[in-house]
Image (spheres, grey):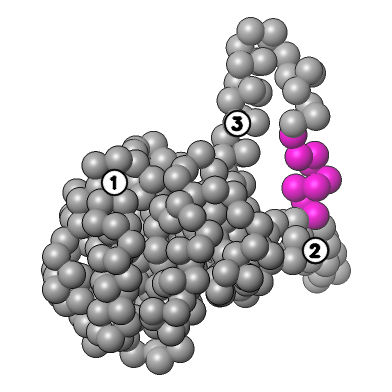
Amino acid sequence: MQVIGAINAYAARMAQATGFRALYLSGGGVAANSLGMPDLGISNMEDVLIDARRITDVTTLPLLVDIDTGWGGAFNIARTIRSMERAGVAAVHIEDQVGSKRCGHRPGKEVVPPEEMVDRIKAAVDARTDQDFVIMARTDALAGEGLAAALDRCAAYVAAGADMIFAEAVTDLAMYARFKERVGVPILANITEFGQTPLYTTQQLGAAGVDIVLFCCSAYRAMNAAALKVYHAIRTEGTQSNVLSLMQTRAELYEFLGYYAYEQKLDQLFEATKRS
């Protein structure tokens, strides 16, 4: 199953119209695109909830949300789970990095002891009121502790109640089969550009036992690159004429928004007002 990153509500509408069946909200994406800050544990629950609510308000697709380390101890994690459920989120992933976390594909990551992560998972599972709400455990231990330790951690996380496993920064396709064999629950592969994981295809990953393929940041990276080119062009050339090919047209924007249906409703209301 492909899960596609949607950095805002409009991107979510485009993704649904394209045929994707599940959406993702990246914590690093919220930090960068909504707050203009790096992915270093600076954003908080409310920052992510704002964007999550906006997405669930306009789409019918299930949304997987990155909740980092849960934003605190057991009580904070419980509050996070309840808040995500109320916001219409379908699933979250919680990770085993320390509170002052880093991007999963950067060096110098530090993880908490496995027992502490087990407690995080137990707090999340205990707080869940909707049994269909998915709690996924992410491990960042592969980079610093190696495959054997990461496998042990994931087995412990599943034993604690995690429904699915997300091993971050996997460097070899064969590792996914090891995770799937060890944990016996669905596993996710994060195929993110410019990171430690090669850009394996959905077909390759499926053959290796992967159940969910996440494309967390692809769309917003493309959006940001196009915007930067437009800014440079307007600043240096004094016109946007040479970068129109990078832009979505007004008609395309209206199509994804369902703009014309709103406009027709307004026309009906105005006509009714005139008749009265």
N-term mark: 2 or 3: 3
Nearest to the observer: residue 267 or residue 67: 67
Range drawn in magenta: 247-255
At label 2, the amino acid type is Ala
Q: For the stretch drawn in magenta, what is the main secondary structure?
A: helix
The x and y percentages for residue 79 are 24, 74
Residue at mark 3: 225
Residue under numbered circle 2: 261
With 73 as the anchor, is 152 left or right in this view?
right
Give how far across and how far down residue 81 sits, in percent.
Answer: 31, 76
The mark lying in front, picked from 2 and 3, is: 3
Side of 151 relative to 252 (left or right): left
Q: Nearer the viewer, residue 50 or 15?
A: 15
- Give the mark nearer the N terminus: 3 vs 1: 1
Q: Amino acid at mark 1?
A: Arg
- Which type of secondary structure does the marked residue at label 2 adopt? helix
Q: Earlier in the sequence, mark 2 or mark 1?
A: 1
- At which x and y percent is residue 188? 49, 68
State the residue at coordinates (60%, 31%): 225
Of 213 and 28, nearer the camera is 213
Expressed as whole percent of the image width and height from the top left, the position of residue 7 reads 53, 52
Measured in 3D between alpha carbons, the distance from the residue under mark 3 to the one under mark 1, in whole angstroms, is 23 Å
Q: What amino acid is found at the position of numbered circle 3 in the picture?
A: Ala
> Is residue 224 shown to the viewer in this render?
yes
Give the mark toward the camera: 2 or 1.
Answer: 1
* Residue 86 image-quadrant placement: bottom left
Locate residue 39 relative to residue 144 in the image: left or right.
Answer: right
Classify mark 1: helix, strand or loop. Answer: loop
Please, is residue 64 above or below residue 162 in the view?
above
Taking the spot 34% from the left edge, 46% from the top edge, the residue there is 103
The question of residue 251 being in magenta is answered with yes
Q: Identify the residue under disc 1.
A: 102
